[in-house]
Amino acid sequence: MSNLTPTGITANRETGEMTIAWNDGVTSTYPFSLLRNACPCAECRGGHENMHAEPTEDMYLIPVLDARKTRITSVELVGNYAILIEWEDGHRYGIYNWRYLRALAEGMHGHQ
């Protein structure tokens, strides 16, 4: 769906989950740890050559992370196509576009 957009985004710090309601009626729930592990920035991916438009299998193998790395400080809208997440450890470089987030959610179903 090329015009896939969220109709609502909530981040629940108590449960450690972000929920996105999509305009096609689907609701996706993301653990903060998965969002951090799947951060699409060059630093987290190990360089520009390792950046991909779609999530990769290793993103679902979540290591034990420092708690500050998996607590969200803020979520900002980037234009009308993505969000930028700021983490408690100060990391704020990953821009998560709608297609990437939806693919990440769909990939979760195969890893539960």
Image (cartoon, helix red, strand yellow):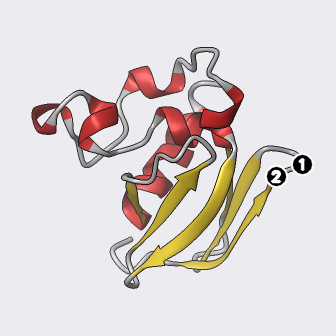
Q: Residue at x 75, y 48 (%)?
A: 17
Q: Which of 74 and 61 lies nearest the eye of the viewer?
A: 74
Residue 33 drawn at (x, y percent): 63, 34
| As drawn, 23 above or below 112 | below
Q: Which of 84 and 101 lies nearest the eye of the viewer?
A: 84
The numbered disc on residue 14 is: 1
Q: Amino acid at mark 2?
A: Arg
In what quadrant of the picture does the C terminus appear?
top right
Residue 74 in which image quadrant = bottom right
| As drawn, 90 above or below 18 | above
Q: Amino acid at mark 1?
A: Glu
Report if the CB atoms under discs 1 and 2 are less than 8 Å apart.
yes
| Residue found at the far front of this picture | 90
Q: CA distance from mark 1 to mark 2?
A: 4 Å
| As drawn, 82 above or below 29 | below
Residue 93 drawn at (x, y percent): 37, 53
| Residue found at the far right of this picture | 14
The numbered disc on residue 13 is: 2
Q: Residue at x 50, y 32 (%)?
A: 37
Residue 110 drawn at (x, y percent): 56, 29
Q: Residue at x 40, y 84 (%)?
A: 80
Q: Which of 108 and 94 lies nearest the eye of the viewer?
A: 94
Residue 105 drawn at (x, y percent): 56, 47
| As drawn, 71 above or below 79 | above
Q: Secondary structure at mark 1?
A: loop
The numbered disc on residue 50 is: none
Does residue 48 appear to the left or right of 81 in the view shown? left
Q: Secondary structure at mark 2?
A: loop
